[in-house]
Image (cartoon, grey):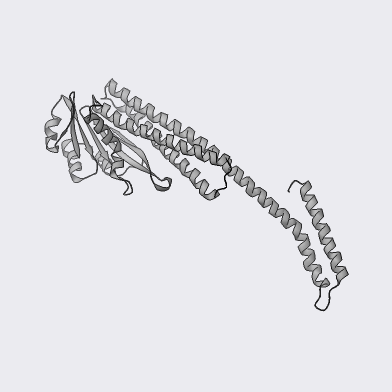
């Protein structure tokens, strides 16, 4: 866990033992970042901040959807950030926040064992680095929270832009009619679609959380409300862009599938025509052939007539299929 005290002079790291004394000060605010859950973290949230047991349980357990709990002097939120893994799988990186007028507490996880801890800490670490270097001056816990969530929204926008680049390359391959394995190519198309859908879902759910927080957070200052509205706008923008790109990808996928299905339909029709042409000939040869070609001798005249009839039937059926437009 990392504890920082933030005031007009900047941000400084402090020891956890200083937490009770820092809570009594009014010339700044504190930021406690909890990378991984522990008994110590639970004790601090319970005994030092006296949070509601439900909020503590939600910050300890994994939440598959965003959450919002508003209390008289603080608000508890749960949002997710995407992390694309192997095979197009999208991991949900959870970030829990306790936001008040004089503190911000961020809790990460739980996360999948396949996701490195650095990925979950990416946004908070980047914001902390900006504060330590003096490039970011957060005037309030809501301002600090805004910086963190804005980093998540920007990351989502960057991911959508990267997927859009991949979609453009996929569209070029579709229009070029490249000779590829349809199963593998469709898997690439649907993997990109799944990534866009996951990002869109996270952004839409995040926007709903902040839309409700704006309505219910009574202790927030007008500046804090404006910051939450800015976060809402960022989430909505990412969701709209991701959805429009997803619709474009669906159009590319449908075009590819329609062309592939048409090829398969044409091939099936031709096979059916071949079967229709050869079926009468096969039937005739199987019924009559055993009576023309016998073990002791062959009736050459009858065999020639039979072959001529089979040829005429084939030509007639072939011509008829051509007139129907099947060949």
Query: Which residue is pictured at 57% across the width and 39% down the height?
Result: 175
The answer, for residue 188, to whether it is visible in the render is: yes
On the image, the x and y values in percent for residue 248 come to: 52, 35
Query: What is the count of numbered marks?
Result: 0
Which one is in front, 139 or 201? 139
Q: Is residue 151 left or right of residue 162?
A: left
On the image, the x and y values in percent for residue 203 come to: 39, 34
Query: Which residue is pictured at 79% across the width and 54% down the height?
Result: 317
In the displayed structure, 65 sits above or below 183; it is above
Which one is in front, 8 or 129? 129
Q: Is residue 42 left or right of residue 187?
A: left
On the image, the x and y values in percent for residue 2 come to: 19, 37
Q: Is residue 302 left or right of residue 42?
A: right
Query: Which residue is pictured at 70% across the width and 52% down the height?
Result: 270
In the displayed structure, 49 sits above or below 296; it is above
Which of the 4 image quadrants contains residue 126?
top left
Task: Identify the image quadrant of the N terminus.
Answer: top left
């Amino acid at each position: 866990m990392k504890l920082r005290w933030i005031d007009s002079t900047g941000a400084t790291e402090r020891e956890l033992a200083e937490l009770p004394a820092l809570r009594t000060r009014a010339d700044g605010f504190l930021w406690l970042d909890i990378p991984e859950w522990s008994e110590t973290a639970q004790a601090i949230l319970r005994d030092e901040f006296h949070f509601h047991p439900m909020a503590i349980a939600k910050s300890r357990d994994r939440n598959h959807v965003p959450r919002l709990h508003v209390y008289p002097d603080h608000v508890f939120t749960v949002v997710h950030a995407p992390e694309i893994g192997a095979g197009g799988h999208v991991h949900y990186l959870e970030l829990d926040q306790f936001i008040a007028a004089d503190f911000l507490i961020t809790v990460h996880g739980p996360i999948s064992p396949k996701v490195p801890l650095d990925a979950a800490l990416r946004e908070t670490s980047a914001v902390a680095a900006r504060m330590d270097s003096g490039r970011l001056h957060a005037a309030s816990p809501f301002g600090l929270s805004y910086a963190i969530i804005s980093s998540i929204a920007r990351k989502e926008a960057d991911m959508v832009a990267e997927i859009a680049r991949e979609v453009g390359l996929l569209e070029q391959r579709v229009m070029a009619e490249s000779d590829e394995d349809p199963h593998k190519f469709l898997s690439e198309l649907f993997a990109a679609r799944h990534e866009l859908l996951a990002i869109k879902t996270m952004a839409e759910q995040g926007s709903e959380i902040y839309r409700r927080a704006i309505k219910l957070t009574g202790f927030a200052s007008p500046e804090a409300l404006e910051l939450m509205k800015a976060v809402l706008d960022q989430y909505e923008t990412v969701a709209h862009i991701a959805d429009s790109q997803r619709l474009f990808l669906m159009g590319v996928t449908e075009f590819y599938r329609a062309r592939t299905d048409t090829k398969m339909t044409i091939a099936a029709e031709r096979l059916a025509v071949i079967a229709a042409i050869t079926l009468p000939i096969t039937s005739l040869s199987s019924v009559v052939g055993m009576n023309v070609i016998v073990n002791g001798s062959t009736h050459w005249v009858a065999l020639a007539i039979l072959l001529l009839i089979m040829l005429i039937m084939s030509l007639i059926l072939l011509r008829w299929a051509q007139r129907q437009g099947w060949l």
